[in-house]
Amino acid sequence: MKVAIIVAAGSGKRFGGQLPKQFLILNNQPVLAHSIEVFKESGAHVIVVLSPDMVEYWKELCQQYGMPEHEIVLGGNERYHSVKNAIAAIPDACALVAIHDAARPAIDVAFVHRMWEAAERNGSAIPYWPIADSLRMEQDGQWKIIDRNLVRSIQTPQCFRWEWIRNAYAGQFENTFTDDASVVERMKDVHLHFELGMAENIKITQSQDLEIMKSILENRNNKSEA
């Protein structure tokens, strides 16, 4: 069995006093719903991690928009604890686990299948994308050039063998964790596999990102209908 954990816990970034971004309506359904549909189509059991104060509102949205069936787990204080709560709900019969940020709704089934397959071969699949911008690092009042050819942007879903992610999250929280890969990476004798991601797999962080995402999804729909 494959399990997809979609992390939508926490208050999330709010644009102009609106709802957290993962619950805003994007192309006629909530942002979070786009990822649920893709993972369900990929054949995964879906667990959505929600802040306790958003559960009832989410259930109302599910009825309103006819969401695919999924399991709900309550989140914790940090993203680490939210993922740990979801992992505790996964049966031991699981084979692979994908952990995905709800604010990245532009994934597609072909991409998710590619991540599943890479994780089956290598034990993990961490999607990345090259950096296009020029980069500098501020240090002691100096702005130093960073070679962008040595830097990659890390995306989700990050996929792992079940025993890897289960054992990794059995440990204690550390402030140095930036994503699930960094949690798994602390284990000895585990080597992460990095796989090319998707250019469209951006994370909604600013209000203008919603318009960009709307255009991406509309273009995709137009191509599929052509």
Image (cartoon, helix red, strand yellow):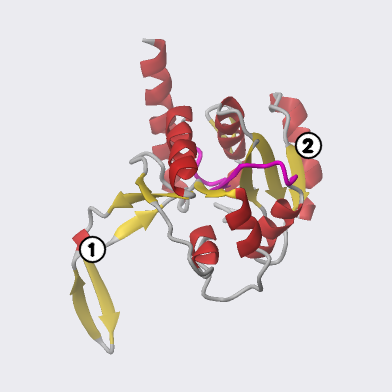
Note whether 167 is above or below 146 in the view shown: above
Q: Nearer the viewer, residue 104 or 198?
A: 198
Residue 150 is labelled as: 1
Task: Kindly give the residue lying farthest to the right in the view shown.
Answer: 56
> Which element is circle 2 on?
helix
Q: Nearer the viewer, residue 183 or 108?
A: 183
Looking at the figure, which quarter contains the C terminus? Answer: top left
The total number of labels drawn is 2
Q: Measured from the top left, where is residue 108 in percent x and y? A: 46, 31
The kind of residue tagged 1 is: Leu
Q: Nearer the viewer, residue 66 or 113?
A: 113
Task: Kindly give the residue lying farthest to the front in the view shown.
Answer: 189
The kind of residue tagged 2 is: Lys
- In the picture provided, is 193 more to the left or to the right than 20? left
Residue 50 is labelled as: none
Image quadrant in which you'd find residue 96? top right
Report, in whole angstroms, how far the alpha carbon at label 2 lies from the one at label 1.
Answer: 44 Å
Q: Nearer the viewer, residue 200 or 188?
A: 188
Q: Which residues are magenta?
A: 91-105
Residue 59 is labelled as: 2
Q: Measured from the top left, where is residue 223 in percent x and y? A: 36, 17
Note whether 85 is above or below 115 in the view shown: below
Specify few, some or many for label 1: CA neighbours under 10 Å numbering under 14, 14-19, or 20 or more: few
Residue visible at 60% across and 39% down in the picture: 32
Residue 104 among those drawn in magenta: yes
